[in-house]
Amino acid sequence: MARAAKTTTEKLLMPKATAVWLIENTALTFRQIGEFTLLTEIEIEALANEDIGRGLVGRHPIENGELTPEELERCEKDADASLTIAKRELPPVQGRAKGPRYTPVSKRGDKPDAISYIIKQNPEISDAQICKLVGTTKPTIAAVRDRTHPNSSSLRPRHPAELGLCSYQEYETAYNKGLKAAGKDPEAVKAERAAQLEKERKEREDGQDDNNMSSDAFDFSNFLTNTNSTSEKSE
């Protein structure tokens, strides 16, 4: 019979990064790491095989006060033991309350531009996710999409993170969630997009090289004209 995961009121700040460190630096089982980080064994195995989280830098739980060396040593010796998060003097990190994101008055006029960017560049992101990222409403999103918004004629699609409406990490999370909801592998889609961008870059460079070669070619027309004129005069 499968063991029930050990519950705890403490939570790790960066569970996946912590899992990567434990995979690379300890002899713990996937089950032990999964219970400690509150991830599934399938996720831990995927991290170990770099099917997900490729390039993710490990986070040292001991140096960050989330695990003691004694606790780690105890569980490495006993595969049936479960890790316990070290008690911290600081209060636990409080998550942001659910609800519309507050946006400063000075940036509220940028929301339609951000919505337009998301719709064009990453249509996989759902309207619900756009509402959370930008702090807007579904009717506003629909108006931008249908070009019935009052500012439709002057919209300039811009990345919401560049406008200060959300962070790049929040945007990336929403994008990955949208891809998964559509049944797509985020890493595969990003690799395909990177390959397409690289192809377009090479085509632009090749086009510039061809233009440079054309402009550098010597024009013999004037030379021939001058030669013919000289010959006629000498006759």
Image (cartoon, helix red, strand yellow):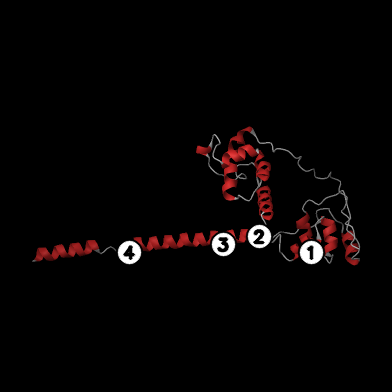
Looking at the picture, does residue 89 appear above or below residue 21? above
Secondary element at image label 1? helix
**Which residue matches tag 2?**
187
Q: CA distance from mark 3 to mark 1?
A: 30 Å
Q: Is residue 62 visible?
A: no
**Which residue matches tag 1?**
23
Spot the residue most to the top: 105
Q: CA distance from mark 1 to mark 2?
A: 21 Å
Determine which quarter of the picture holds residue 45: bottom right
Secondary element at image label 4? loop
Q: x, y (%) of residue 179?
A: 66, 54
**Which residue matches tag 3?**
195
Q: CA distance from mark 2 to mark 3?
A: 12 Å
Left or right for 68, reference 164 = right
**Which residue matches tag 4?**
217
Tell which circle, 2 or 3, labels the residue nearer the N-terminal end. Answer: 2
Label 3: how many residues lie within 10 Å, few (<14), some (14-19) or many (20+)?
A: few
Left or right for 89, reference 227 = right
Residue nearest the viewer, comparing 192 with 74:
192
